[in-house]
Amino acid sequence: MRHVKPGTYARHTMPGALRRFSPSESLARLEDVDLEGLRASGKRLILLDVDNTLIPWRTEEVPDATHRWIEQAHALGFELCAVSNTSKPERLARLCESMRIGFVRDKNKPSRRMFLLAMERHRATPEETVMIGDQLLTDVLGANRSRIDAIWVRPMAKQEFLGTRIISRPIERVMARLLHRYFQAAPTDGPDPMSPGLYSRETLAQFGKFAVVGVGSTLIDAGLMFLLMFFVPWDGRPLGQALGEWALAAYPDLFRFAAARPSDAAVPILKIPATAAAILNGFYWNRRWTFEARDHALRARQFRRYFVVAVAAMVVNAAVTTVFNNIVPGHPKQSLLVALVISTVVAGVFNFYFQRKWTFAPPE
Ligand SMILES: [Mg+2]
C-alpha cells in the first residue's frame, strides 16, 4: 500500500468532486498522528476505523503501539470512538473494551449515518471532529460527506477483505494519482516511493546500475559458455564435444538436431550452468549495489523472486525476438539484429521494473 504517502493535500484548490475523496493529510502510521497539533486546532473527538487502522485486519491482538497512542490521546483530553460496519459486533465490542474506547456500528461507510451518530453521542460538531482510517472510499469519503476532516493512514497489514483488495485499492490508487497534483509530501519522509514513478533521478541511477550488472551477467553467461564448450578439456577433447557426443548417443531422438555436429547437443545443456551463474551474479550485485536491499531476513524471498522475474524476462526476450524476427522483410540478418535490440530493451525494462517493484521492494 505504498500509494499512501505521508503528506498533506491542498484541499481548498481541488475541484469539488475530487475534494470528496481527499484526506486533509496522509500518514504512514497511526502513531504519526500529531495529536497535540489536532488539539491545538480545536479537535476533541477522534473517530477511528478499526480494521487495518487500529489493529491488523481480522486479528484480536491490539498492538502495543495502538495502546500507547490511545493512552496519549486520552491524556490530551480527546474522546475516541470507533466507527465500524463489521459483521462481528461481539468482536468489535471486545476490542473496543480492551482499548477503552467507545464505538458505533451502523450502515456501511461511506454512509453518513455512523459519523453523525458518533458526533451526536459525543456532542461534537464536525469542526471539532477528525476521522482516521485506512480507506479513501469508505473512511475518507464518509468523513468528507459528513464535513469532518479525515486523516488517511497506510493500512497496518497487507491482508484484507478480498473486495477491498481487488476493487477498492485499485480505485484508490487511481484516486491517489489524481490527488497527487494537490499533494505536498511530508519533508521528513525520505525518498518518495511512489512518485514520480519510473523517471525519478534515483530510479534512473538504479536503472544504470542494473544495466551495468546486466552486461556483467551477459559476459559471464557467454564467457562460461565459451570456456565449457571449447576450452575445458574432457577425455582429450573439449567438454562441449564430449558432452554432445554422449548426449547424442544417450538420447538420439531428443538431440536429433545435432546429428551433423554433435557439439551442438551440448549447447542447451551447458546453457543451464552458464545461465545459473549469470542469475547468481545478477542477484548478488543488484541486491548489494543497485537496490541496496541487504536485509538478511529477506534474502531467501528476494532470491526466489529474483529467479522468477529473471526467467520471466528470458521468456519475454525470446517472445519479442520471435515476434520481430521479420521486421525488415527480405533481410533476415538485419531483422534479427533489430529484433535482438528491441527484445533486449523490452526484456531489460521488464526485468528492471519487477525486480525493483517486487523483488527488492521494502516490506510493507
Ligand atoms: Mg479499515
Image (tube, helix red, strand yellow):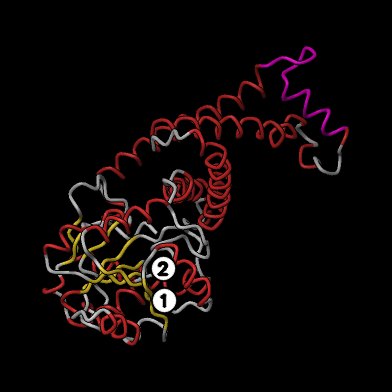
Q: Where does the image place residue 112, in percent across and percent down from the top left?
A: 31, 86
Which tag, 1 or 2, sits closer to the chain's start?
A: 2
**Residue at image x 65%, y 30%?**
273
Residue 355, x across and y down, in percent: 46, 45
Q: Which residues are magenta?
A: 232-249
Callout 1 crowding tier (Cα within 10 Å): few <14, some 14–19, many ≥20? many
71 horizontally vs 124: left or right: right
Q: x and y percent of residue 271 in the render?
A: 65, 34
Residue at image mark 1: 84
Decide if residue 334 is in sight here. no
**Mark 2: is the Cβ under 8 angstroms from ligand 1?**
yes
Q: Are marks 1 and 2 in contact (CB under 8 Å)?
A: yes
Marks 1 and 2, how far apart at CA: 6 Å
Q: Where is 284 relative to 150, above or below?
A: above
Query: Amino acid under label 2?
Result: Val
Q: Residue 177 in magenta?
A: no
Which secondary structure class fits the magenta region best?
helix
